[in-house]
Image: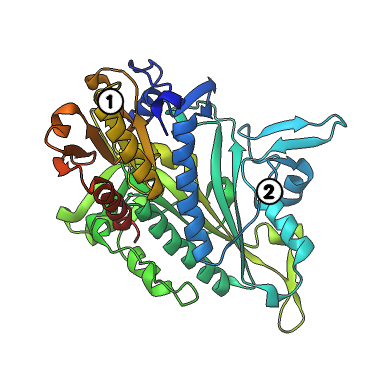
Amino acid sequence: MRLSRYFLPTLRETPAEAEIVSHRLMLRAGMIRQESAGIYAWMPLGLKVLRKIEQVVREEQNRTGAIELLMPTIQSADLWRESGRYDDYGKEMLRIQDRHERDMLFGPTNEEMITEIFRASVRSYRDLPLNLYHMQWKFRDEVRPRFGVMRSREFLMKDAYSFDLDKEGARASYNKMFVAYLRTFKRLGLTAIPMKAESGPIGGDMSHEFIILADTGESEVFCDNALLGLPTPDKDTDFNADLSAVVDDWLSYYAATDEMHEVDRFESGVPEDRRVSARGIEVGHIFYFGTKYSDPMGAKVAGPDGEEKPVHMGSYGIGPSRLAAAIIEASHDDNGIIWPASVAPFDAGLVNLRAGDEKTDSTCAGLYAELEAAGVEVLYDDTDDRAGAKFANMDLIGLPLQVVVGPKGLAENTIEVKTRSGGERKSIPLEGAGAAIAAMVADGKRALDV
């Protein structure tokens, strides 16, 4: 994409309302624009990041055998009355009426609706286990939306819902999602720690939040530092196998949010030099809630003995829109964003230092075409801005590689490549530069393909 034809409304000054790094940088990089309190438009650069996060999440869900569908954003209040949550949920739920004065709501979550879909379609234990998921925009009327898309009122969520005959089967489904979440966050360049957590309005008696450590985190967390070095299950993991040993290994180390923190257990069970007390950002939450919804809503299947039983359910959430901000919180410097290769909006930025110069223009055009043909996504800065502004803009938007073409290098038949994450610069021969850059891009992506 040529920058001269792209829509990238960057800002030089930091908006006064932006309190944390991710909010400041997302606004300055032209990723988002606030339309009202806690509600944002996703601009082209931000949307590209969001779609890539979605794809990583989708690939890992599919790997477990989960099946994607899409549920509507507007739900009938009657479903929530069946489960008993309509009056309990609170003012965060946006309650509305249609033209026939029927009570409706803008869904903050989908346990009721997925239960209704299941009970209308599944009758036998032979159709279990089943895991259905979707990615959908949701709305929760936060009393104080803040931190940009980190705590907004409208947000994108991936929700998965598992259905099993009994608790044993439900635990196996829970373990699959546990492992899938570890892999998902690692592929996004994040180290996420599963921590025992409260279930909140979702309900249930087993729940873990996946937390990344960050100074701007909303809550205090406590964990064993050994968790930061545990290996992530690799892509050859068999999700049809028993994964309890993998999960139990992770859960054998202390990790808890402040609501679940046990001071005595933490201090007696974790060596002092391994105790971590920090702020954390929640990037995923998984729940097992048994028959909390299936029982009152009549979601039953016939077991092997022919007796009907309510199914055991679990719920598994990841917020792709929140993840975009969380990745920035974990990966940035004073100059801007540093995107992991897996979710960068473009693989490389091509900087023409002398637009209008025949040799520089023709070299850039040829390199641009060669990289695009090799499957490398390139943002080509072909504008006539001064060099300093071009470099600052590339650092701000955080593409993994910056390819710099100018008369000085061309006089020696070289171009410069800068790695955004470490700032390393090196000159490479112009001949074969396209293949060399494509290989660098592939290596960067491969490093996160755990």
| In the image, farthest residue toward the left | 412
Q: Is residue 185 above or below residue 358?
A: below
* Amino acid on which disc 1 is placed: Glu
Quarter assignment of residue 15: top left
Task: Residue at 26% x, 47% y: name it.
Answer: 437
Q: Is residue 380 above or below residue 187?
A: above
Q: How many marks?
A: 2
Q: For the residues marked 1 and 2, what is the alpha-carbon distance in whole angstroms?
A: 54 Å
Task: Residue at 65% x, 58% y: name it.
Answer: 292
Q: Is residue 76 left or right of residue 44?
A: right
Q: Is residue 408 left or right of residue 134?
A: left
Tag of residue 71? 2
On the image, the x and y values in percent for residue 87 come to: 70, 39
On the image, the x and y values in percent for residue 98 come to: 81, 31
Q: Earlier in the sequence, mark 1 or mark 2?
A: 2
Secondary element type, mark 1: helix
Quarter assignment of residue 213: top left
The residue where tag 1 is placed is 358
Q: Is residue 6 above or below residue 373?
A: above
Label 2 near label 1: C-beta < 8 Å? no
On the image, the x and y values in percent for residue 313 come to: 61, 62
* Amino acid on which disc 2 is placed: Met
What colouring does the structure picture have? Answer: rainbow
